[in-house]
Amino acid sequence: MPQHQNESGNMALDRRAFMLTALAAGTVAVGASAVVRAQVAETAGATEGLSPVVETALGSIRGARRDRVFSFKGVPYAATTAGAGRFQPPTANAGWSGVRDVLELGPRCPVPQSTAQAEFVIMDRREPAGEDCLCLNVWTAGLGDGGKRPVMVWLHGGGFRGGSAGHRCYDGTNLADKHDVVVVGVNHRVNIWGYLYLADIGNSQFEQSSNVGMLDIVASLEWVRDNIERFGGDPDNVTVFGQSGGGSKVSTLLGMPSARGLFHRGIAMSGSQVTSISREDATKTAERFLAALNIRPEQAAKVLDIPYYDIREAANIQAFNWGPVMDGRTIPAHIFDPVATPLSANVPLMIGSMETEATWNTDQQYDQLDEATLQIMAQRVLRTDAEQARQVVAVYKAGRPRASNLDLYLILASDVSGFRVGTDTQAERKAALGAAPVYKYYFDWYSPVAGGNLRSMHTMDIPFFFDDVKTAVSLIGDAPELQGMADKVSAAIVAFARTGNPNRAGLPQWDPFNGDSRATMFLDLDMRLVADPYREERLALMGVLSQQA
């Protein structure tokens, strides 16, 4: 999930700290008691123990067993990136002798705090952080049985700035148990650690220092290729999936030559990467960051001697634009601009967004809006004049007669955001290639928590994709019908991972998306396929946004 600087500073942090404390103490309605129940349910009635030892290419590991699912956490897939490895591409791990217990989450990359809603953040395990963070987690119901299960590699949210694979919402137990797939969650470098672009500063020591966070993910996929059969998985049937920043990472992999052949399908949830940062802008950012440490570009090697917590602090003091760079080598071109990359033309893609993506951040206000205020806020978010804003609002009102003014604004703000515009653009341009199907979804189920304010916010689809609604009761509540929705959604997701087609018995027909029919599956308590949904709204927005291009 993306994370942005919060202008309200300490007030926002204080609110988040209060909310997290309240949730943990059981003082917030719906959230706290449900979280406690979910955490108790994680172990209640389960048969637990150690797993058999698995021989990987790097050494022997022993994980944990809960009922029929085996988990392996904190498994190294590359060498440490501390010391001389800082800001360099990942290198091979030398391996180990003896049996390595992998029972606990490995360290996450050092990152800033999230500004997401507390109902989601409460599920963050907040595992220790460190530069030696290239590790992954595996969940499987088959060890050494010769199985050829689909492999689903999860790329966590947090934009390119934060997050980790250790979040409770990212646990792969239910997918492995109920759907017979192998799930892999990956930690990798983000923020300055993964995206400080030093390749063009003139120091030969850093000529390869470009997009190393994405190269970490490629290294993890190479680990999957070389080892996943030992866990009952099929290295020739790998799906990368991720939400928000994870969806952007999935999108980026589609345009990376080094990733070709390492995965066979992609699922981008509320995340896109239509264009990447230019080399010139990335170099300016690197020079500005080095200056913050009183380092001149020709002295860049000094950055290797600075304690990591000082680098972390400097990166957080100023707003830096961290993300993939179109360097001409690891990312040779913009991935979806002006057309979709041909590098992954034959890779099927599932992509979609939430109806009210905008409600994810703690800054969002939920005061009801009168007509004048709606018009003002619409004009601001559209960055247009009052008359055009009035016309767009009129279209939204006509198409959604039961929506309040606040609902209309939140949907409009979500439609204008990169969450929606980016995913729509990628769906259109990928489908235009005509080489592999695109399946598009629109999630419009509204959560009852927080008085219903969160609606269908960014991240709300994660527990349904992972078939794990009990863990996420702080976010979605605990209504009994939610499991039925999770059954349907997860079944379609797994069917897509298994075959490249989400259709299966018991689900409504899901047709591929194209520029004419624009077939879109609405994900709610009842899944339904809609042709060119909210067409008039889309055209009205295109009329405004096209003038700003």
Image (cartoon, rainbow, N blue to C red):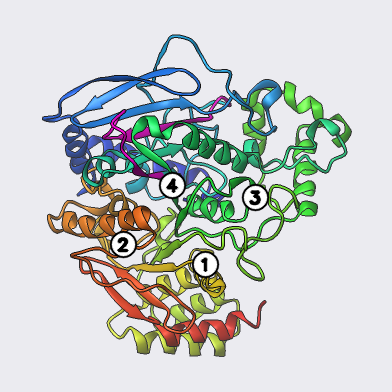
- Label 1 SS: loop
Q: Quadrant of residue 372?
A: bottom left
Q: Which residue is located at x 27 percent, y 65 percent?
A: 445
Judge depth for marks 3 and 2 and give the one in front: 3
Q: Which residue is located at x 59 percent, y 79 percent?
A: 545
- Label 4 SS: strand
Residue 522 in view here: yes
279 vs 33: above or below: below
Q: Are marks 3 and 1 in contact (CB under 8 Å)?
A: no
Q: Disc 4 or 3, which lies upstream in sequence?
A: 4
Residue 28 at x, y = what percent? 24, 45
Q: Residues within 10 Å of mark 1 (few under 14, many from 20)?
A: some
Kindly identify the amino acid type of the residue bearing the numbered disc 3: Pro
Q: Residues within 10 Å of mark 4 (few under 14, many from 20)?
A: many
- Label 2 SS: loop
What residue does disc 1 label? 417
Judge depth for marks 2 and 1 and give the one in front: 1
For residue 453, the mark is: 2
Q: Nearer the viewer, residue 350 or 277?
A: 350
Q: Disc 2 or 1, which lies upstream in sequence?
A: 1
